[in-house]
Amino acid sequence: MIDENIWEHYMTDKAIQLFKNKYQCCGCNACEMVCGKKAITMIEDEYGFRFPQIDTDKCVGCGSCLKVCCINNEAELRKPETVYAASYKNKDISAKSASGGIFAALAKQVLTEGGIVFGSAYTEQFDVEVVPIEKIEDLPRLQGSKYVQSSMNSSFLEIKSELQTGRTVLFCGVPCQVEALKRYLGRGYENLLLVDIVCHGVPSNRMLKDYLSFLTDKKKMEIQSIQFRTKTKGQNVYGEIAYRQVSHTGEIAYWQEPLISYKSSYYKLFLNCQTFRDSCYHCKFAGTKRPGDISLCDYWGIEDEHADFVKKVEKEGLAGISAVMLNTNAGKDFFEQVKQEFVMKESTVEQVAKHNPQLQAPSVETPERNQVLNCYRQSGYQGVDDFYFKKYRMKILTSDIGQVLPNSWKKKLLQVIRGKK
């Protein structure tokens, strides 16, 4: 159902206007995919964020694009009925996950039964796109935090086609993508499982690629892979970049370098909510009511809520704990099939939300966000990196000090740095 007055607001003389302000578009591609006349194309703005553009010569004013918009229509959201803290018992698969490995377990079950799983993956060129996988050995492509907006391409069309054959489909995405798929399909399917990831916000894919090109030029090495979250240092914000270098003699060297959040301008600006698209700061999915059958997120603050469970997970040698929110009967029924794969403890959405800002309200847009984007527009990623290290140099220095000095030395040295006696 289209929200009241949307036609009046977004159609003038049969010319459709999909949004009036940038924050009214999340870049989900649903309008492009639903258009039978192929009148809509996703176009990047000056910051790399994709927005739909209508070819008025092809558009017949049918309004299908307005009907599938997940931002300007009322969303079907549900508060979780059951919530768990959980960690996947499969250590090999869980090690490749950013948190408790829950998505991997759900996907493995679907694939084992002959189903198909859609999620975000890197291409060889570091574009992040929603792709299908049909084999368990391909699961690592979809694991791990990407910290960027993924392109949907034609995935909704593929999902609908698979559903119509009766095949089980699992789709995992950020909440606006999940709601967009629901609106595109237009009805429920018993063979569809929707998993939404509690989302911090999304930078543009172009900015990520420019950041990686910046590192390549700076280090004179080719980047092979990037992980924003690894478990080499527990659940901390700590990642890893793998490099490849070919010498003048043709010898090839490979090595890995830690990606420490405060030493990476891209990583830290993401954590500071300073590189997201406009819609992220107005997100109607940032709350305890969710669009998916199952919602997943890190269980931050679990030490305060379930200290006994943390000890149990550590004793069993598992890495990472997720919050699993079951929002629908379909979600609960599917979880029943796999719950024996987890170490878990019942919790509440209020306990999870207490420590997760994205279950309370959208990310806050700070004045620095406009400064960052202006630097990017004017000077490319070099400008962004210069801005970050100039503005936050003292915080970076104090973080470095905190990593190497004993506590007794830190206060004294900081006083000297700041010119205090």
Image (cartoon, helix red, strand yellow):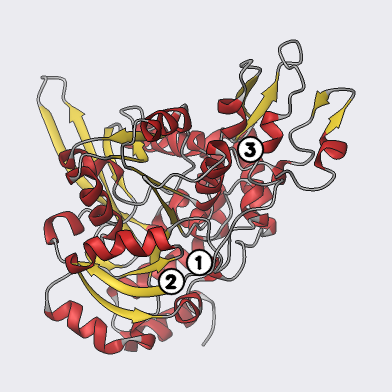
Give the mark, 1 or 3, whose residue is nearer the N terminus. Answer: 3
Residue under the image location 31 percent in, 51 percent down: 144
Q: Residues within 10 Å of mark 1 (few under 14, many from 20)?
A: some
Residue under the image location 41 percent in, 66 percent down: 326
> How much space separates mark 3 and mark 2, taking CA atoms?
48 Å
Q: Nearer the viewer, residue 276 or 257?
A: 276
Q: Nearer the viewer, residue 299 or 44?
A: 299
Q: What amino acid type should be assigned to the residue bearing mark 2? A: Thr
In the rendered image, the quadrant that contains the N terminus is: top right
Give the mark, 3 or 2, whose residue is nearer the N terminus. Answer: 3
Q: Which residue is mark 3?
A: 68
In this orientation, does residue 62 appear? yes
> How much space separates mark 1 and mark 3, taking CA atoms?
47 Å
Q: Which residue is mark 1?
A: 394
Q: Which residue is mark 2?
A: 398
* Callouts 1 and 3 close, C-beta under 8 Å: no
> How much space separates mark 2 and mark 1, taking CA atoms?
6 Å
Which label is found at residue 196?
Answer: none
In the picture, measured across the screen, residue 34 lies left or right of residue 15, that is: left
* Residue 47 percent location from the top left of the image: 61, 35
Q: What amino acid type should be assigned to the residue bearing mark 1? A: Met
* Callouts 2 and 1 close, C-beta under 8 Å: yes
Q: Please tell me whether mark 3 or mark 2 is closer to you in this view.
A: 3
* Residue 334 percent location from the top left of the image: 31, 59
* Callouts 3 and 2 close, C-beta under 8 Å: no
